[in-house]
């Protein structure tokens, strides 16, 4: 199928080639969509119990062969091996969560004289990201297949090998040929897939800019489903005056900002620090802890906290953002530095931007944390909400009433209290508002956008109708 321009994935740790092949041609895209359409009726009419059994078989294979996938993810995008294993575990755990969610959200139910049933949309396109090349597309694929849709999955061009491995695992688990297909390529392939008239929806995880372009392209076809998971300029409010355990608070901040080398869409980008006598102590503790972060090869011993960024080109973007913020008046507290030229290795950075006017409202997708000092809790909430994004927000405070106030006023789809921002549960909704999503959260609620309801009033036999004014007896 893939006979277009050459495509390679590069190990960001050492520059070696992990996978090489070809991008799909336009003809190959059309053929994939036609094949997906041709098997849709059979798959959508397969009993739900049989579909569940295939999903469970997939989970079993992930559990037995998952180390192989974790090794591949670590090599392809630079995620530490220990962390890649947690990603694979989350993929396996998604199966039972998807089955439960489908049963709770999409089972037929009566309503007065009516009954409601659910139908799959048809052919769905899943566009996957590079930061979680297995888990995030899996979060769309599992509920979509369970609902009876057929799926065409375009992995990130940085992680094509992960996509191929997932397809082979599904086929080995008993999924019929054509129900799930992988189409490789970059932006041009994604455009060709998403503009095809025979698709029934797009499930996307990625940047706000790309998501907006997808929304604009789908505007003339409102009957097709579009589920957008996008990024965020996420705030973490630190109520320093009301925190007793300073080292633990610093550790939560570190995990919020620098887990996955800052390449999680829920990472804290803005540390909103409320001034107090303890604020300086907390900031010094944070700098000390972040300075000690171990950055190394994904398979190094002892295991690193951070591996390289997913591409050798990505450190340059983060360093440019650091330079721009510094030029605008930011004060570097811990400088991010590139390591090993030609690789994705980068040390984490912290910059105080409290005195920067017209602070850019942009997501810096990497290990760079911006500190904004404010005078009180009300100011902290105002600064937190001063963004076009609304994915995740957090509050560190020992004062419950402060969290209650924040939970009512913060504008985000995920709000955590004394928990790292990078912690999210697949058993809960996952998604944001404003430029972070289109109000179709995934994770447990992915079931909601993978099918649509049909309401019916049903009487088994035609019979006499009740009298109505203006009709003869």
Image (cartoon, rainbow, N blue to C red):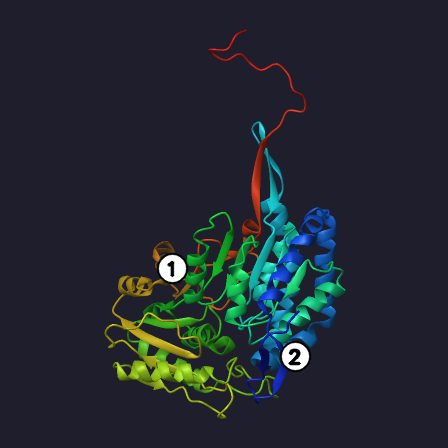
Per the image, label 2 sits on a secondary structure element best described as: helix
Q: Position of residue 156 (x, y in %)?
A: 55, 71
For marks 1 and 2, the one nearer the N-term is 2
Of residues 76 and 236, the one drawn nearer to the viewer in this rendering: 76
Question: Quarter holding the C terminus?
Answer: top right
Of residues 285 and 209, the one drawn nearer to the viewer in this rendering: 209
Q: Quadrant of residue 231?
A: bottom left
Image vertical order of residue 198 relative to residue 325, above or below = above
User: Is the C-beta separation of discs 1 and 2 under 8 Å?
Assistant: no
Q: Which residue is mark 2?
A: 71
Extreme-bottom residue of the structure: 340
> On the picture, is 135 further left or further right than 170?
left
Binning the other alpha carbons within 10 Å of mark 2 as few (below 14), some (14 to 19) or many (20 upward) gives: some
Image vertical order of residue 36 relative to residue 129, above or below = above
**Cα–Cα span, label 1 and label 2:** 40 Å
Q: Position of residue 151 (x, y in %)?
A: 62, 58
- The disc label shown at residue 403, or none: 1
Q: Is residue 391 visible?
A: no
Q: Quadrant of residue 452?
A: top right
Q: Position of residue 254 (x, y in %)?
A: 45, 77
């Amino acid at each position: 199928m893939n006979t277009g321009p050459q495509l390679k994935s590069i190990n960001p740790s050492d520059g070696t080639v992990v996978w090489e092949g070809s991008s799909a041609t336009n003809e190959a895209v059309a053929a994939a969509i036609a094949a997906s359409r041709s098997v849709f009726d059979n798959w959508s009419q397969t009993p739900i119990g049989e579909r569940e059994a295939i999903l469970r078989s997939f989970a079993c294979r992930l559990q037995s062969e998952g180390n192989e996938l974790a090794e591949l993810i670590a090599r392809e995008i630079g995620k530490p091996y220990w962390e890649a294993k947690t990603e694979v575990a989350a993929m396996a755990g998604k199966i039972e969560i998807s089955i439960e969610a489908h049963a709770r959200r999409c089972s037929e139910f009566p309503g007065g004289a009516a009954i409601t049933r659910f139908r799959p949309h048809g052919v769905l396109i899943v566009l996957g990201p590079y930061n979680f090349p297995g888990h995030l597309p899996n979060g769309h694929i599992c509920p979509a297949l369970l609902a009876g849709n057929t799926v065409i999955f375009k992995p990130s061009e940085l992680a094509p090998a992960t996509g191929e491995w997932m397809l082979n695992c599904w086929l080995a688990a008993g999924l019929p040929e054509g129900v799930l297909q992988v189409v490789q390529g970059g932006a041009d392939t994604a455009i060709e897939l998403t503009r095809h008239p025979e698709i029934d929806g797009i499930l996307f995880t990625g940047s706000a800019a790309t998501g907006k372009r997808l929304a604009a392209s789908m505007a003339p076809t409102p009957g097709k489903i579009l589920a957008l998971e996008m990024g965020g300029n996420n705030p973490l409010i630190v109520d320093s005056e009301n925190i007793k355990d300073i080292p633990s608070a610093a550790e939560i901040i570190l995990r919020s900002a620098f887990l996955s080398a800052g390449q999680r869409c829920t990472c804290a980008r803005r540390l909103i620090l409320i001034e107090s006598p303890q604020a300086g102590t907390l900031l010094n503790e944070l700098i000390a802890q972040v300075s000690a972060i171990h950055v190394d090869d994904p398979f190094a011993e002892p295991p690193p906290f951070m591996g390289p960024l997913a591409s050798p080109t990505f450190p340059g973007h983060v360093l440019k953002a650091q330079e721009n913020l510094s030029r605008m008046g930011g004060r570097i507290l811990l400088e991010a530095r590139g390591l090993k030229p030609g690789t994705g290795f980068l040390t984490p950075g912290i910059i105080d931007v409290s005195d920067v006017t017209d602070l850019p409202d942009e997501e810096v997708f990497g290990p760079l944390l911006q500190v904004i000092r404010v005078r009180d809790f009300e100011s902290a909430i105002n600064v937190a909400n001063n963004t076009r994004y609304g994915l995740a927000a957090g509050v560190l405070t020992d004062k419950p009433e402060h969290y209650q106030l924040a939970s009512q006023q913060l504008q985000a789809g995920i709000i955590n209290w004394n928990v790292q921002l990078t912690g999210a549960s697949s058993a809960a909704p996952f998604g944001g508002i404003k430029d972070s999503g289109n109000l179709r959260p995934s994770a447990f609620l992915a079931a909601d956008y993978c099918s649509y309801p049909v309401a019916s009033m049903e009487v088994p036999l035609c019979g006499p109708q009740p009298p109505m004014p203006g009709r003869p007896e």
